[in-house]
Amino acid sequence: MYSRSIITIRSIFPFQYFSIGASLIPFIEHNDANRALMSSNMQRQADSGISAIAERKGKIIYTDTQKIIFSSNGDTLSIPLVMYQRSNKNTCMHQKTQVKRGKYIKKGQILAGGAATAGGELALGKNVLVAYMPWEGYNFEDAVLISERLVYEDIYTSFHIRKYEIQTHLTSQGPNMARNR
């Protein structure tokens, strides 16, 4: 047994041992370890983490798609918003304002959210009606069948942004030519 004076950290909640992504997996203790690891990585990739949060209280003066301007204790602060930028996973990051002009905000309030948030809370995925049932052997083990309607109505459509660069050099015969062959 240790003395109270040398103990600085103690466990309070059982999920403290898991990352945020792993803590979002329902019934993780009943999951296969490999599936839990894969799911945790998927959760990490899905959350962009780009919510703009108010660092102090104030009043919203101006909002548009590019910035939020608010006044706090006589200071005017401008918060630029992320617009259609590429993430490290080649997905599209875009912030939308969550506040209106003329409103007063509190410290810690969400000013702008991304694709992974709704109303300032984490919101990953889409809710669809599902059924667990056999279908001519196509959904063996962990395979999933989805309705064609989900494809045609762009329910699970996502943006992917890639950046390609090419360098051309000036040669003795003239500049390099880039061709599509």
Image: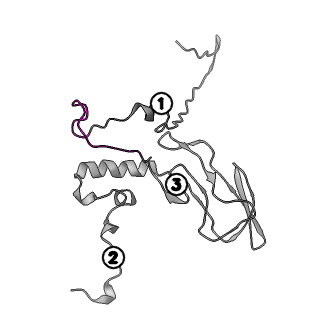
Query: Over which residues does the magenta segment extend?
Result: 128-142
State which tag comes first along the sequence, 3 or 2. 2
- What SS does tag 3 mark? strand
Q: Position of residue 2 (x, y in %)?
A: 24, 86
Q: Amino acid at mark 1?
A: Tyr
The mark found on residue 152 in the picture is 1
Colour option used: one colour
State which tag comes first along the sequence, 1 or 3. 3
Q: Which residue was labeled with disc 2?
A: 12
Q: CA distance from mark 3 to mark 2?
A: 28 Å
| Other-residue count near label 3 (Cα within 10 Å), few / some / many at <14 / 14–19 / ≥20 | some
| Other-residue count near label 2 (Cα within 10 Å), few / some / many at <14 / 14–19 / ≥20 | few
Q: Is residue 140 above or below residue 22?
A: above
Residue furthest right in the image? 74
State which tag comes first along the sequence, 2 or 1. 2
Q: Is residue 35 above or below residue 101?
A: above
Q: Nearer the viewer, residue 94 or 179?
A: 94
Q: Amino acid at mark 3?
A: Thr
Q: Nearer the viewer, residue 89 or 165?
A: 89
